[in-house]
Amino acid sequence: MLRPWDIQFSFEDSPAKTLHSKLLNCITADIKNGRLAAGVMLPGTRSLAKQLGINRKTVQQVYEELEAQGWLKSKLRSGTFVSEIMPEQGLSASDSSLINNTIKTKPSSELAENLYLDAVALADCVSITNDGTPDARLIPYELLARTYRRVCVNLSRQARLGYGDPRGAIELRNSIQKMLFSDRFINCSNQDICIVRGSQMGIYLASRILDAKKGAIIMEELSYLPAHAAFEANGFKIIKCRLDEQGLDIDHLREILSTNEVSGIYVTPHHQYPTTVCLPMQRRLALLELSKRYQFSVIEDDYDHEFHYEANPIPPLASLPNSENVVHIGSMSKVFAPGLRLGYIVADTRFIERAAQEIVLIDRQGNTITEHVIADLMDSGEVKRHIRKVRREYKARRDHTAKEFTRLFKGKATFLLPTGGLAIWVDISKLVTGKNIADFNNSDSTLNTFFAAEQKTPTHIRFGFGAISMDEITRSIEKLADELIT
């Protein structure tokens, strides 16, 4: 039966910061004041998202949360309804008085809250959500299992499973030092290396160690939002530097430095995130020269150095002249899978000591067993062998992705073939002009508007090909073409 009237919602006067909180509070208030009576059917998630001009996923998350709290009830093939019995009914007077007297906590930023909600949603997602992530199905499970067992036995027999160095196991730091020297031209000692739980922890530690009172953090205008949130959470003003077809715009950087006090710059020079552009040597040298002249730190996020498919990759900033102010952050998670949670920081000894002090306050140290396992696999050559194997596979997937975009979009979407990485940056501006794509939904594609704190008009997508097979790539691009080409 058709509803005579559509229920309208408005949360313009809501004091909440995020769209999720605004809608959550709006529906809860409407139920409490009787506007939404028991048994009333709510609009579908797609309809409500369109009405409010927000992402459908936000509405889905709100409905799920309110159902878990008891305010709503979903019925299979029928829809979502206001519960007949409210959560507050049946509570004693003393219990009711406690409902709104929750512990007051320091508020988070809107960006941090949204990232958390996205992370929770991904954790519950059965399908692969792909933003240039590696394919966990390529992990050498049997080799890892055997190595974990052997390492556990050996460490247990040697009574080495107690507390250890907060900088990480010396065995792994030695292995990483050899790898950096041989493969990336970085001349450092094991005292200049600290093991962390993935690159995000390394970024957060850097945001804790650098002093927000000494200046702002510069970031690329499209960048990694969790890094933005980390610096923001630790009191930094964020200044955006323009990008062009070669990456970070050095001329604009000079303008910023001439008028602002700057504590550091966060960059992804190897494969710019999200555009995949490799910063050329001339700009790298210019950036390092500026870091010495203006005395600011350069936080180099080298998140997927292993996956470069053409010529030899340009050496990292940390290996070049004038790199004294560089904090190099790398990850082993991309080599295997994000769930492995293993990365490292390379910097001067004092910076590493400060990082270790922060780690002591967070969780004392990392995972001793995993660190010894990776050290064992690195020293035996198994990590290098695995990288060579998956690099060939990812290169084939990149080439297949390019071929399918060319075949299915017939020039209506354009791209530059990335020299490396696990994603491709595609220009869809010709397809979205004058269109409302608020309901855009493709688990392997992310709109460029996601990578900027300020919302902009969609012009590009970042399509991740790493986590999906060639058949899955074809099906995903076919779905994308159906959505965008009308």
Image: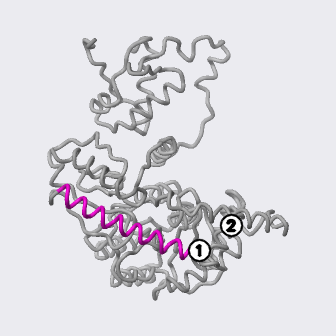
What residue is shown with label 2? 147
The x and y percentages for residue 269 are: 39, 73
Residue found at x 53% / y 75%: 385
**Picture quadrant where residue 281 is located:** bottom left
Marker disc for residue 414: none
Magenta span covers which residues?
Answer: 383-409
Task: Check disc 2 and report its element: helix, strand or loop.
Answer: helix
Q: Identify the amino acid type marked 1.
A: Glu
**Are discs 2 and 1 less than 8 Å apart at CB?**
yes
Of the residues shown, which amino acid type is indicated by label 2? Thr
Q: Residue 117: percent from the left, percent from the top? A: 48, 42
Q: Residue 67's x, y, as percent?
A: 49, 25
Q: Please determine whether, in this image, residue 121 is positioned above or below residue 444.
A: above
- Write down the residue under mark 1: 382
Q: Looking at the image, can residue 423 be seen? A: yes
Q: Which mark is first along the chain, 1 or 2?
A: 2
Q: Residue at x 55, y 67 (%)?
A: 332
Q: How many marks?
A: 2
Query: Is residue 341 found left or right of 469 in the rendered image?
Result: right
Residue 252 within the magenta-colored segment of the rendering: no
